[in-house]
Amino acid sequence: MEYLYFPGCTLYTKAKNLDEAGRECAKVLGFELRELSNWTCCGATFPLAKDNIMALAPPARILARAKEEGGTLTTLCSVCFNVIKRANRLIREDSEKREKINTFIEMDYQGDVRVLHYLEILKRDVGFETLKAAVKRDLGGLKVAPFYGCMLLRPSEEMEFDDKEAPTIFEDFLKAITCEPVDFPYKIECCGAFQSVGAPEVATECAYSILSSAVRNGAEAVTTTCPLCQFNIDSMQKEVHEKHNDFPGIPILYFTQLLGLALGLPVEKLDFGRNDVDPRPLLKGKELI
Amino acid sequence: MKIEISRQKVHNEFAQKVEEISGQNLFACYQCGNCTAGCPVSFAMDLGPHQVIRFSLLGLEKEVLESNTFWICASCLQCTSRCPKGLDIARIMEAIRLVILRKKERLDRLEIRELPGEFLDRVPQIALISGFRKFSS
C-alpha cells in the first residue's frame, strides 16, 4: 500500500514528533508514505465566507498535484485534513467554483482524489486487529484520554470521519495499541484553536477545562492528532498553571508517538524531548522506556 | 432598551450583508440558544451567538459590531453541528468579522508586532497562519 503524504506547515519543525513517528510507524506496518512533491501550506483554515474563493487555491493545488502523482492523499494533521477534505468536496460539487479555481491555479482538477487521515488508514486499510498483532511493547493499559478536537469531526456530513457527538475511532485505536482509553466529556470540544494568538486567555481556559476533565476521569496522558491542539493543551499548560494553581499538569502525546512506542520503535525516534510537558517521567515510571 | 421594529429595520443593510457573505438565512433562527449553550468559548463573549443573530435582525448593527462575540469565536463548528435549523453559525460569525476587516480602514484585530517575542518563539506556524487569516485583512 502506498499513500501520498502531505505533511503541512508545522510538521517539519514544531510538530516533528508527530511527523517522524508517523513515517517510521508506516514502515513497520508495511505501508509507504510518499511525500507529495512541491507541496505548499493548505491555508490552515477552511474559508467560511461564501465568496472567499482565493483561500481555496492552496488546497486545490495540493489536490491537483496529488491527482497528477496518482494516489490517495493522507495527512497526519487534523487541520490539513479538514481543509483539504472540505475543499475537495466543494470542488467536486460546485461546478462554478471549480471552474474559477481551475482557471486561477491553471490546472484542471475535478475533486476526485481520495483523502484519508492516517487514523483512517490504520482502521480501514491496516485494520485494528492487524495493528494489535503488530504490538511489540505492551503499554500495560496506560490510561490515555483521546482528544479529538474539532477538525477531524466537523462538519460531519463533509468529514465523514466518525459520529459527530460520540466518536470511537480514537478509542479503538488506543485499545489496539494496549492503552486504556479514558472517556471524558470534553473529548470533542475545541482547544481554542487560533485563539491562542487572538485571545490567549480564552484558549488557556479551554485547555484548563479539557485537561482538568481528563485528569478527573483518571487519565495519565492525553493524546491528539493536531499540532494546534498540541500547542494549546501542551505548551499553554504554562499559562494554565499561572492562572490555576491547583492544576496538576498532564503529558500530551501525539498519537503517532504512542503508536511508535507500542510498535517498539527506538525511543530516540519518538522525540519525547519536543513535548512541552515531558512525558518521560510517566513512561519511565511505567517502565515503558 | 427601547427598540423600534420595522420591516426595513428587520431586513436592514447590515443583516443583508451578513447573509450575503455567510450564505445563511438569519430568519431561520428561532432563538433556541443551542449554539450558545454548546459554545466552548461563550463564557468570554459579550453576547451569545444566538443574540448576535437576533440583534442583527433588529438593526442593532452598532451593538453587534462592538461586541467581542465574533472575535472570540474559534470556528470550531460545534454550533453549526448542533443547530436544529441547519444554520451554519460559524459562517455567520465569519461574515461579521469580514464586515469589519473588509472596510477600507483595514481595522485588523491582530498585529504581529504586538505578539511577545517569547510567544513567537514557541508558537507553531499553524496557529499564526490560522490566526492571521481570521484576524487580519
Image: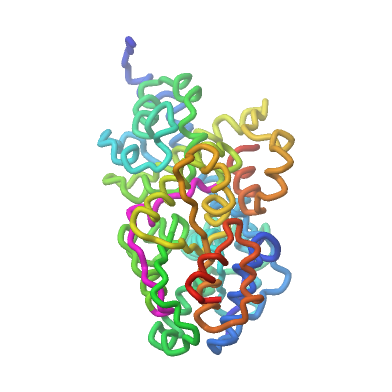
Quadrant that contains the C terminus of chain A: bottom right
Q: Which residue is drawn at 44% across and 56% down?
A: A149
Q: Where is residue A238? Give x, y as percent.
A: 58, 46
Determine whether A123 is above or below A272 in the image.
below
Coloring basis for residues = rainbow
Q: Which residue lies furthest to the top in this view?
A: B2
Could you say which is closer to the camera, residue A163 or residue B64?
Answer: A163
Residue A115: in sight, yes or no?
no
Q: Where is residue B110? Give x, y as percent.
A: 64, 35
Determine whether A255 is above or below A126 in the image.
above
Task: Give the residues in magenta.
Answer: A176-193
**In the image, is A276 to the left or to the right of B11?**
right
Q: What secondary structure characterizes most of the magenta part?
A: loop
Could you say which is closer to the camera, residue A279 or residue A193?
Answer: A279
**In the image, is A189 to the left or to the right of A256?**
left
**In the image, is B111 to the left or to the right of A128?**
right
User: Does the magenta-highlighted stretch encompass residue A186?
Assistant: yes
Number of marks drawn: 0
User: Does the magenta-highlighted stretch encompass residue A153?
Assistant: no
Quadrant in the picture for residue B16: top left
Q: Where is residue A142? Give x, y as percent.
A: 42, 71
Q: Which residue is drawn at 45% across and 75% down?
A: A120
Q: Which residue is drawn at 74% across and 35% down?
A: B113
Residue B9: in sight, yes or no?
yes
Quadrant that contains the N terminus of chain A: bottom right
Q: Residue at x 49, y 46 (%)?
A: A192
Q: Where is residue A253? Give x, y as percent.
A: 53, 64
